[in-house]
Amino acid sequence: MLTIRSLIFNGIAATPIEIQVQLTGGLADNNKFRIIGLVDKAVAESGERIRNAMAAMNLSLPPRVLTVNLAPADVEKSGAHFDLPILCGILGAMGILPESELSKYVIMGEIGLNGAILKTNGILPASVWANENNLGIICPAANGGEARWAGHTNILAPNHILDLINHFKGTQILPVPSSPVGLPHVALAKCGDLSEIRGQSAAKRALEIAAAGSHAMLMVGPPGSGKTMLASRLPTIMPPLTAREVLDVSMIYSIAGQLSGGSLISARPFRAVHHTASAVSLAGGGVEAKPGEISLAHNGVLFLDELPEFQRQTLEILRQPMEQGRIMISRAKRTATYPARFQLIAAMNPCPCGHLGNAALSCTRAPRCAEAYQNKISGPLLDRIDLHVDVDAVNPWEMTDNNEPRETSAVVRDRVVAARDRQLARSMKLFGREILNAHLDGRELDAAVPLDDAATKFLNDAAEKMGLSARGYQRIRRIARTIADLRGADAVTLSDIAEALSYRPIRSGKF
């Protein structure tokens, strides 16, 4: 009995699957074979694809009982990437491929009816798993560059099954795939520059704080005030991804089938989600429990424009991932856990018409319509958003004011990088691991944000007057810590607390 290794994924974590191929005595229909184990339709149809591929190569199945078992039997196997390992197992059982060599590889790939090996999803995390377990990987040629990013060279990436057969027979050598140049998933040139935004100095300051500490941010203002422009400039002032972050993000995109050309995601993702998005598209799911927008925004930005227009149950999905940095997707046949450490940036109008407070433009139903509109967003979700910023309309004459000093994204990014370096170095010294200010909690927050008696009394009095929750109170401390880091200070002062309080709703209500 021959055993071949392949994989399924629980999030980005790989689970090995053993494909056991056995030939037994007795005559049988050599056009068919049995696939047993808990499999979906795509795996069950592998028999037809493999039979046609072998016929295209003038090969036929032996006239014996051929059984293919996918173990463990109680775990459902799904996806066409089992085609290639099943075919390799059959060819190994027939003596066409060497069994001893096949056991050294993890094998993934879909088979075409003509024997071509077709592109499949999840090759990057599969290659990482193979490298960690001292195994090689056999994958489609279209995924070869992607597999190469895992850091090893024991990779076979054939275009056709005949290429693989010839390689093991010694009549053809499959070259090690080369790593393509990593192209940014988000072209920063298309995001524009912060200096292009006229006015909005307060909103720009809040955006800088958000970037420095990875804080969630909500912008409220009339149409045309620049909320979307501000959000789109956030990636241009954020630090570049680290090597580990590049790999983590790219593995998610690989499983989602959005890693094109074998290139890694080398820039922070910016996912702008339309308000008609469903709960499944945001959280992830489906038959194969694929990652959703909040996981595709991991280590990047999730931008939700027109926040009250989203379905309320869809927005409530954000609450748990914002706290924990991951999401578990549970379906009837599959459970997957994906990273979801995203930075939420949201924007909204103050009311349906968008002109609340402007006597010339607001509708006759104000302010009652504004209250109903804002009540579409739950208090617990708003409480998880660190920075609440009013974005006022820009005066027309400001659009042509060329004397206004405007900093470029590069200048602001230097300050953001310096602030992040400070907080990461501090957390490594205090806690032995790197933590951004937005993710400090409990004893970590107490150690990173010590306050003197005057600052503590000031914060306590303000929290009582503003009706802050315990969560809101802690978020003020996190924001103040980031403000102090931006000015290069070790201690959080009363002025830092005061600025942080200005980014929370003053009234005990929502806005």
Image (cartoon, grey):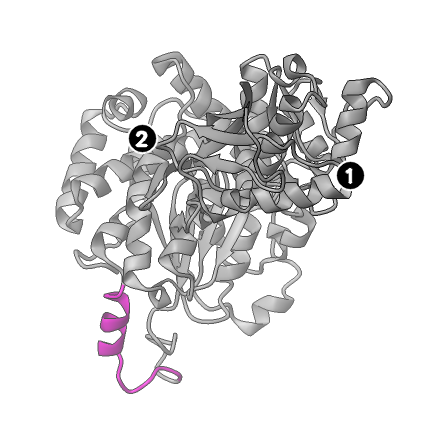
Which residues, given as a range, are shown in magenta? 361-376
Q: Viewer-proximal residue, 272 or 364?
A: 272
Q: Is residue 429 above or below residue 413?
A: above
Disc 2 marks a residue whose amino acid type is Thr
- Quick one: quadrant of the C terminus? bottom left
Answer yes or no: is residue 407 visible.
Answer: yes
**Residue depth check, mark 1 versus mark 2: number of the one nearer the observer:** 1
Give coordinates of residue 46: x percent, y percent.
Answer: 57, 43
Answer yes or no: is residue 261 visible.
Answer: no
- As drawn, is 151 to the left or to the right of 309? right
The residue most toward the front is: 27
Mark 1 neighbour class, 10 Å CA radius: few under 14, some 14 to 19, many 20 or more: few
Under circle 2, the secondary element is: loop
User: Where does label 1 land, which residue?
Assistant: 57
Marks 1 and 2 sit apart, C-alpha to C-alpha, by 75 Å
Residue drawn at point x = 57 percent, y = 67 percent: 398
- As drawn, is 377 to the left or to the right of 465? right
Disc 1 marks a residue whose amino acid type is Met
User: Do labels 1 and 2 touch, CB within 8 Å?
Assistant: no
The verdict on residue 417 being magenta is no
Residue 366's image quarter? bottom left
The residue most toward the bottom is: 364
Q: Viewer-proximal residue, 363 or 100?
A: 100
- As drawn, is 132 to the left or to the right of 151? left
Q: Viewer-proximal residue, 30 or 256?
A: 30
Residue drawn at point x = 70 percent, y = 47 percent: 113
The residue most toward the right is: 171
User: Where does label 2 land, which residue?
Assistant: 493
